[in-house]
Amino acid sequence: MVTPLLKRKRAKRVGEPPGSLIPSAPGTAAPVSRTLFSYDGSGYRETLLTGDIDFRALKEGSGVSWLNIDGIRDSHLLERVGDGLAIHPLALEDIQNPDLRPKIEDYESYLFLSFKMLRWDRARSAIDSEQVSLLVGKGWVVSFQEEREGDVFGAVRERIRTGKGRIRSAGADYLAYSLLDAVVDHYFLVLEQLEEAVDAIEGRLVGEPGAEPVGDIQRLLGQVTLVRRAVWPLREIVLEVLKEEYPLVAEATHHYFRDVYDHLLEVADTVDLLRDMLAGLVNLHITSLSKNMNAIMKVLTIIATIFMPLSFIASLYGMNFRYMPELSLPWGYPAVLALMSAITIGMIVYFKRKKWM
Amino acid sequence: MVTPLLKRKRAKRVGEPPGSLIPSAPGTAAPVSRTLFSYDGSGYRETLLTGDIDFRALKEGSGVSWLNIDGIRDSHLLERVGDGLAIHPLALEDIQNPDLRPKIEDYESYLFLSFKMLRWDRARSAIDSEQVSLLVGKGWVVSFQEEREGDVFGAVRERIRTGKGRIRSAGADYLAYSLLDAVVDHYFLVLEQLEEAVDAIEGRLVGEPGAEPVGDIQRLLGQVTLVRRAVWPLREIVLEVLKEEYPLVAEATHHYFRDVYDHLLEVADTVDLLRDMLAGLVNLHITSLSKNMNAIMKVLTIIATIFMPLSFIASLYGMNFRYMPELSLPWGYPAVLALMSAITIGMIVYFKRKKWM
Amino acid sequence: MVTPLLKRKRAKRVGEPPGSLIPSAPGTAAPVSRTLFSYDGSGYRETLLTGDIDFRALKEGSGVSWLNIDGIRDSHLLERVGDGLAIHPLALEDIQNPDLRPKIEDYESYLFLSFKMLRWDRARSAIDSEQVSLLVGKGWVVSFQEEREGDVFGAVRERIRTGKGRIRSAGADYLAYSLLDAVVDHYFLVLEQLEEAVDAIEGRLVGEPGAEPVGDIQRLLGQVTLVRRAVWPLREIVLEVLKEEYPLVAEATHHYFRDVYDHLLEVADTVDLLRDMLAGLVNLHITSLSKNMNAIMKVLTIIATIFMPLSFIASLYGMNFRYMPELSLPWGYPAVLALMSAITIGMIVYFKRKKWM
Amino acid sequence: MVTPLLKRKRAKRVGEPPGSLIPSAPGTAAPVSRTLFSYDGSGYRETLLTGDIDFRALKEGSGVSWLNIDGIRDSHLLERVGDGLAIHPLALEDIQNPDLRPKIEDYESYLFLSFKMLRWDRARSAIDSEQVSLLVGKGWVVSFQEEREGDVFGAVRERIRTGKGRIRSAGADYLAYSLLDAVVDHYFLVLEQLEEAVDAIEGRLVGEPGAEPVGDIQRLLGQVTLVRRAVWPLREIVLEVLKEEYPLVAEATHHYFRDVYDHLLEVADTVDLLRDMLAGLVNLHITSLSKNMNAIMKVLTIIATIFMPLSFIASLYGMNFRYMPELSLPWGYPAVLALMSAITIGMIVYFKRKKWM
Amino acid sequence: MVTPLLKRKRAKRVGEPPGSLIPSAPGTAAPVSRTLFSYDGSGYRETLLTGDIDFRALKEGSGVSWLNIDGIRDSHLLERVGDGLAIHPLALEDIQNPDLRPKIEDYESYLFLSFKMLRWDRARSAIDSEQVSLLVGKGWVVSFQEEREGDVFGAVRERIRTGKGRIRSAGADYLAYSLLDAVVDHYFLVLEQLEEAVDAIEGRLVGEPGAEPVGDIQRLLGQVTLVRRAVWPLREIVLEVLKEEYPLVAEATHHYFRDVYDHLLEVADTVDLLRDMLAGLVNLHITSLSKNMNAIMKVLTIIATIFMPLSFIASLYGMNFRYMPELSLPWGYPAVLALMSAITIGMIVYFKRKKWM
């Protein structure tokens, strides 16, 4: 199937007023998990939240507070976040829309970022795309992931815990960068899988003459397009961060965003390369089909060209005319056999010369 | 047919002075319906207009007035609107031209917007395109649709009636946004239909070897192009709204237009994706035709390669030479049969090895 | 023929100094016709000029003066115009060059515009391209067309005569707009002809299996390219008028030029669409050729696969071995016939299953 | 051969310091010819230089001095020019590099321009590309051509001699323009030759079914690319002259450079058109090969479909069964002949209906 | 194999904090070689460093100091360089990443440049890509190459030693230019190898009908893409140097960077040309396969068309009907032979006319 990347149902319900959230079905409350990290140069605190969130502490605490929410279907929670942090309803709606195009939006007191987390799903041999949204304020970050508890941000968490690198001494913008960087790092892993898949197809194309790779190529092209759709807008977003001088992103963090930008350019280059390679494989396949055909036709032509004259001669002397003098010659039969051999050898020489054999 | 999207006759008559309307044919006065909504934070009034329109009240009333006109052929009505609201004749002419490219134009005291409403016509399995024009002034909006009474704006009407969302407390620019948003929401529905159609073709391509999808692919490509032609210019229009700082569009409404802009980018991405997928299907079809051919030719070659030598041998011993010693040998016939079997088996082994069988 | 659009000989003679005109051949003075319109809000005067032109009156008269010259080969006349209105020699040379790319140039005291008039030549089934040049000064316009007296500007003339529209009350810039608009209106007529031609090819492709449309498609593509080469630069020209704020084009006329610009965008869109459609038709043709081939090969394979085994069996029992016990069995012949029928039926069933029949 | 345009050896020797000239081989001093034109409004002087050049007179003389040097291998001469006119070593190195991409560089006291002179070499049926470099100072121009004495600048020389046009009264910038214009004029001649070559291929494609034009098309595409590589950068150069307001190029000369710019746009358009046409010819050829194949296969299929059943019937009655009652019927033979005729006629009717015959 | 250019493992380890270096494996300390050049107008000193580096002398010495480090795996050394010269950790990480996209970054007190050194590996018939990084400060340059001791910078070293050219009298920016120029010079050598490889494929395509060049073309396209990926970003980098007016790059050095820029444009042009040529070769190959097929099918058709009727006639007179009057005619056999000859000659004439023979 070419089209799995289009299959997820759109969250936006036609005709609804903008900024309206999807009402949570009461019984099916998804198990939303919330973790709060607070840290500064001197230490950190990690809390698994179960009850209410103290947004005032989040906004006004010293150091950096990072609230991570796994699950975007709990509209009540989203509303409480929206109220507590004065988030625009459109941003909340965007958080709930898993098909959103990666975007950045400046709401002055905070930045809204949304992008795609990609992982390789070995079982489906396909890319697993998940929406990640960030709200980045002065001293706080709220991150949203879809239902599945993933370990994308595990490395970032570990770095806060161990105090490795400069994360604990830096601000919320650096945390936002770290989360984005963690996501972009996974893009490379996905690309490696895609490269392996392309190699596998190429191997099959060369090794098995009967291979039918066009469907697989098309499917892989779909996966590459999925990466492309995640990367292109994200590249623009990071460029905007570098250009627009958002007050929430410190000058010192720009080098880091520039680094992410370079990684994204590298991903984009590789995506283009993969597309070229897949197009090349289609070419290779078409010419190999054509070459196969030539080989088949050569066999047919050789057979027909040798045996048609022979059969004709045989039929000729199978005629029942009463007066066919050759038939009664004692050396008639050997002569015909000799003629037939001569024709056969002649044909073979001819084909050898034409490099058909 | 590839070309239905070009079939509607152009309204612009060659040689007419610019800004001249199409004279209404007296007997065939189309049943133009006019509805007027007036609302502000405190309440709303809905009127189905039959007589004259009080343009002064429309322009100077408190709150927002929305005049919706279904039908663009009544030139008298258009002229009265043009006089009452001081609309430029070129804008009036544009309202009557159903083939207009989506555009925005700033006439200082009002904005003129024109774009395409797309709906999926299940009967024709094709997109139904309809021109929508908006005149957006300070506190008033006039919207024009083509003859057919549609329910595109139904959701917006409902929101005004129920006061759901912030529409009743916002200005004319927010109403214009809401109408545009309602139209763009329908683009997603159209895209879903197109995606289903692409899937259906793909299914047929894989399932039925004799399918002839190129015509359908071409037709679908035409439909995708139609969406593209509606979306590309509209994207530029909304970008212009975001960039040009029209005094009639309040700063606060920008976030909403930015939201529409993101939706349009999403539509545009999907349109590109559909084009790629359709191109991929053509490729798939061409290689499958080629593979089919190979399969046919293999059958032919196998048959010919097996039976031509056999027939030759049979003809050989059907010759009527008087002196053919083999013919009188008692084991001649069985020997020939054995030779024939050996040849057949040899050929089959050869083809098995070449993976032709 | 693919290339008629390149066939006209270039007027620029290699090595000549710039701004030099083509010397009029004395005997062959082309019948150049000159008409002068002078009008203002109160009335108009129309003169067919035969003698000298009073350029001072043209430049200094109140209202607007429009001198139309049909024929660009009379270098003496061009020189007199150049002297009388102080036109730059390069502009005069450009007027005489029928292969000029559409351009606008600001010579401060006047604007020079050059663009292509396109008409559909039914006899040749091809587009007829003609150079139109405008010199637009303060209160005067001089227009140049090639030899042929055309009715392109007829509608504009009529509007001046009848005073319909706002032409009589507007300035020289509005007249220039009107002339340009008249030309662009004809582009739509040409596009309609091209669309019909594309439809005709498509019909033939579907209806007649033996059609050879590639030549026609190529020829049509050439015609579309011709429109494209007329429209693309013209679009840039009008955009320049809208952007550059030429003092000779009043602010109030901008809406009209914007209107022409939108029409040109529409033409450009349609041109792109036609190119896509023609490319689609080539695809359709290639796959239909391939499908045809498959059909032919199936017939051949079916015939060979049925008759080769049958013929082999017949030949087998045509052998002249003395000891072939089957030959003397009374039910030998019917048995062989039965075997042959069985093989035939088996093959037919096989082909039916493979959907080859 | 596709690649002749890459064949000339690069002058830049890897590892050499920048700005170093190629040492003249002592014995092989190429016959470099130097001509000096000095002119102003009142007259001109033409000198064939043999000894030293008086650079002070060149730079400080009244009027314009034009030194033309045919031959770029004489490094001693280049060094003397470099010393006498204070030319940057990089510019001197560029003059010696025949593979230089067309460029303009502003060295403040002079402009350095380099571009390609193209001529059609009838013998090789290919384009002859030659490097032309200009040093344009205040009141002086030095032009460099490769070894071959060409007549490219002959027309300019003639205009100086005769005083035709405004060249004698204009400055060094106008002279530079005239030289550039002379070169661009020749581009049109080259394009005409290419158009003729395209037409010739098209004619062969239509007229001779066995033509093999792909190699020629590829070769021609290479020639078109060569023009493209000469024109694209030159277009940018002239645009830079128009935009950057070099103090050495007077405002009044801009109209003339604008004229050259328009010519280059025209050349660029034609180059694009030729590429499209050549791509169209490849399409035409591929479909014609495919059609040819269809025709061949139809003949084969018709022959096989008619004669296989006939041969089968004949073989059937050639069997040697003892009990074949038909064989002894007196009307057996005529009946079989009648059956065979019926089959043949039936097949022909069938093929006629399928439009295969 | 199409994909060798993707094979090297990425140095960036997913999840590591940014700016962290790869820990040196203690036992496998790569033999890193360090050379220090110090020079000014009056002389130079060359030292092979073994112990610690005196960074203060490097930074504060008069003249220019150039530290060249071959080997990027020694993280301890990198850290010492980072400490001694106050280099940003991200730049250090980039130096260690051999897959980095070419980039330039301004860290105010120094510039960081990274680009690709390309060499043609004759053994593998492929391009050898190596990362080169430069740190350019005021009066000092540090260059990093990968493990292999290469002679890329040999010519620059020689020029410093001999004092040839202006290198000894110029600053650190000129040294940086010289190193970059040395690298770009090698691009031309690589292009020449690629051109030869393209020529070789073309020769094989024309000379050997059975050649299978698509794999080679694809592989070569991969090599061209590798050059493209090295050149495109480098071009942007040099353009940035020319535009951004880095204080570390003197105005006087701009002409030299402009020169490198022109060389890069030339490389980029040639890369595009090579891609076009390779695409052309695929076309050539596809049409030649198709033509081959036509030739094969013609042979088959000719053979079948001649021998099928002949065999049929022979079979006809091999029938065993008792009453076949022709059989007993004395001239029956010669008549049939004559008929057969007539048919054969007729067929040959027919094929000659159709130009099939």
Image: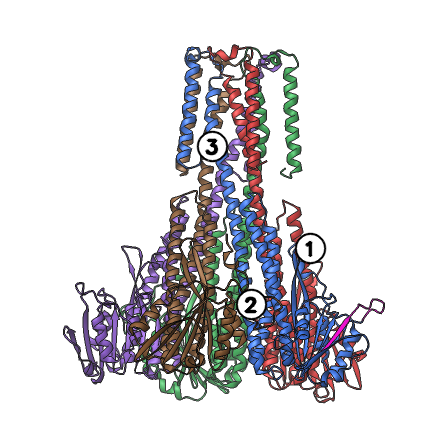
Chain colours: A brown, B blue, C red, D green, E purple
Amino acid identity at mark 3: Ile
- Taking A234 as reference, is E282 above or below it? above
Against D244, residue C147 (above or below) is: above
Would you identify the image quadrant in which residue E326 lies?
top right
Image spot of residue B264 (x, y percent): 56, 69
Looking at the magenta stretch, what is its main secondary structure?
Answer: loop
Mark toward the viewer: 2 or 1: 2
Q: Secondary structure at mark 1?
A: loop
Q: Do we see residue D54 in this rendering?
A: no
Q: Which residues are magenta?
A: B24-38
Horizontal arrangement in the rendering, residue C261 relative to residue C17 (left or right): right
User: Which residue is disc 1 drawn over?
Assistant: B123
Above or below, comparing residue E206 to residue D92 in the picture: above
Location of residue A212 with respect to A264 vertically, above or below: above
Amino acid marked by disc 1: Ala
Residue B15 in the image, given as x and y percentages of width and height:
75, 72
Check disc 3 and report the residue beneath it. Answer: B302
Q: Are marks 2 and 3 in contact (CB under 8 Å)?
A: no
Where residue E72 sits, quadrant-wise, is bottom left
Front-most of residues A337 and E352:
A337
